[in-house]
Amino acid sequence: MISTKQNLYKLGAAYYPDYISSEKTLTRRVETGKIEFLSNKERLVEDFKRMVKQGIHTIRMGEFSWASVEPTPGQWKPEVFSDALDLAHKHNIEVIFCTPTATPPKWLIDAHPDILPITRTGQTIPFGSRRHYDFHHPEFQKESRRITELFAKTFGSHPALKAWQTDNEFGCHNSVFLFTKNAKIAFRKWLERKFKGEIEALNENWFTCFWSQHYRSFEEIELPMASWADQNPHLELDFRRFSNEALCEFQREQINIIRKHSPERPITHNLMTLFTDLCPWMAAKDLDTVGFDHYQMESDPHPMTSAWQFALMRSALQKHFIILEQQPLQVNWQATNRRFSFDWLLLWGMQSAFQGAAGMLYFSWQRMPGGCEQYHDGVVPHDVRIEQSQQEKLIAAKNVIFAKLKDEFQFSSEIPLPARDVLCLHDSESLWSHEITSQSVTYSTRKQIDHITQFCAQNAWGLWFTPALEAEKDRIHSYKLIILPGHAFELTDQERNLLKKFRSQGGRVLSLPRTGYKLRNNKLSPLPAVFYSADDFYLDDYGALLESESEVCDLTDSSLGACIEGHLWSEKIKVLNANWKTEATFSSKSIFAGAPAVLKLKEDSTHGPHVHLATCPVPKKETLSALRKILEMPATAKANSADLQLQILSDNERKFLSGVHFGQHTTSINLQRQQRVLKSLIIRLDRNLEANIEPLLVDENNVLAIPGRTAVFIELANEGT
């Protein structure tokens, strides 16, 4: 039996005692091999025995249970969870308990039908699914406080309950932006406060002279509903700001109640990054730990997207986070719900651990016999005759792997966090601005971040995010490179000074197209792309590229390579300051032929360079290699495949190199000549889904061969040892 004491990386699952039928159901008693009918309580006992056997450390429950514990107003049935909590405590399994506000019961909707949300098109979202509530509604806010307090008082002191989760997946299903009567009332009040009661200040800020949109009072302002043409982009940006503030206030009320009645238990929320509606920085601000639901929308998994999403979750509170829902091999909500090979679950687990996750909970423990998610995968299958599922084998293998990592490298708690090599600006308001006036269905900041992540992974740089440069001013010197990935808004004087100081100490800056075009009110700036001085250069022209278009940019220094390639967006720049040197020009076939495609500012040998790209780099090895050289950025190790993600981890005293290879074929890692390997492991699954862990061999040229579908973990000698 595998011990649940392995605490390097906690493994668990979402669990639903409220979904277990009160009637006797078929299940398997593993000890006897018989198939028997079990009662609800007997099924709970069997589940917990099975969890212990597979090494489950943590379960999460309660997020959809409102009608189960309160079937009618005032009728309280806590035994739905009391028995499960008692069994969890008996079996040494920790519980994350959730407030149930994501699914208000029918009796509440019948009493207050205007609690139901309204979409941008005016459609009322009916009862019968989830997230069917308006968080602006005073009555629902009151009910949210009441049920949260009831949960916190009833369950909050139970010894098995170790943490809380608020609600469930704020923003999922487009549920941040609501168009109800109460949303409009609250928005008008928010605007009146923002503009200090001066409606003419709003008119000026929102450019309401366009299309005759002038307002005489705040009472005239409507919500940005669906319309023939685009709505006012300045109104839309403020509406998104307001909506996020209101949702975070809704969560804050729950947090305050929980802290009062269930103190000393950390509070989390399962954030998502499949959409941009919810600002993760705002939503995480009041939490003790960031939780994350890791799902992918692509028909084929996209490892780079997962990598930066994990890095974003780690960056939100600058510490380890937890995956509260891990996508299984088959979901129920894609156009075609295909399966993937089982080693994806291993690779996702290793990738998340190396990016700062302290644990992973699968969704979910049981496969549901009914409901909308009956085809959604789970740890325990529908077929009760199966003693150990493939998912359970994976959990067992992961426990073996993380126990080995803990012992081999003598970790006392979590795996160390990534080194602070690269700081990337990730501002939700910038993302919203680009979405509101997108100019291209192909371009997005998130695509650029995919490419940035590959750039970092190819060179083993630790990637971190920040919502604003000012937020990192006290430790900005820790980084080697700052990236501005199409940051929509012009830089403030404080931000310019931070960049100047950072570069004066040898730091490097990389800016990508569409950086600094706008004012914070979503108007275009009269001085776009000013990084240091209006006399540096100006934008002569710019625009989006078709999906099939690409730019070939000729490098002026042939030692860097023949060319670099770009896509998505391009700028025609006129250089005014001779200190900005042209490193590449658009080829003769480009509409911007001969104009600078890559510019580099470097005042002297003590300053680090600022490199500005006038087109978005494609994630090809040759392009990224040339870019690294232009930036004068060293790499401890280099990946020789785009499918291999490398990253340096550090606990200040020791240095590690982690790698996850998502490709099928063998590739390699090139270490710098002076790097010395102290310990190494290569991790994979065998055909029986059991862990295969071996030392990794390094040849005389400091090259490491990496087979496909594996993870590697290496301790490197620090410089000077």
Image: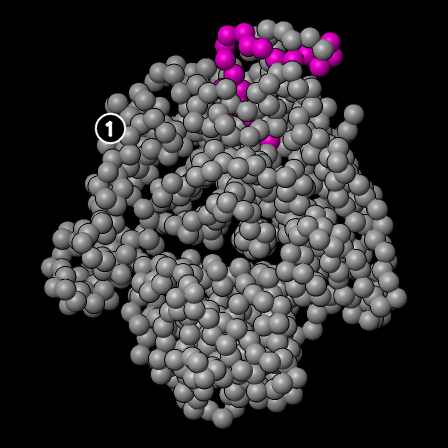
Pick whichever, 385 or 460, lies toward us.
385
At x 63%, y 39%, the residue is 341
Task: Residue 293: give x, y in percent of width and height.
Answer: 52, 41
Task: Residue 471: give x, y in percent of width and height.
Answer: 51, 63
At x 35%, y 23%, the residue is 105
At x 74%, y 12%, the residue is 31
Quarter the C terminus occupies: bottom right
Pick whichever, 158 or 384, lies toward us.
384
Q: Quadrant of residue 127?
A: top left
Judge whether residue 462 can be spotted in this image.
no
Helix, strand or loop at disc 1?
A: helix
Task: Residue 567: give x, y in percent of width and height.
Answer: 46, 69
As drawn, 249 above or below 305 = above
Question: Total number of numbered labels?
Answer: 1
* Crowd rating for badge 1 (residues with CA inside 10 Å; few <14, some 14–19, many 20+): some
**Lateral position of residue 720 relative to residue 626, left or right:** right
As drawn, 240 above or below 42 = below
Mark 1: which amino acid? Pro
As drawn, 301 above or below 656 = above
As drawn, 101 above or below 443 = above
At x 33%, y 65%, the residue is 439
Q: Quadrant of residue 625?
A: bottom right
**Lateral position of residue 674 relative to residue 39, left or right:** right
Judge whether residue 552 can be spotted in this image.
yes
Pick whichever, 660 or 679, lies toward us.
660
Q: Is residue 696 magenta?
A: no
Q: Which residue is mark 1?
A: 113
**Lateral position of residue 686 relative to residue 425, left or right:** right
Quarter the N terminus occupies: top right
**Magenta residue span:** 13-32
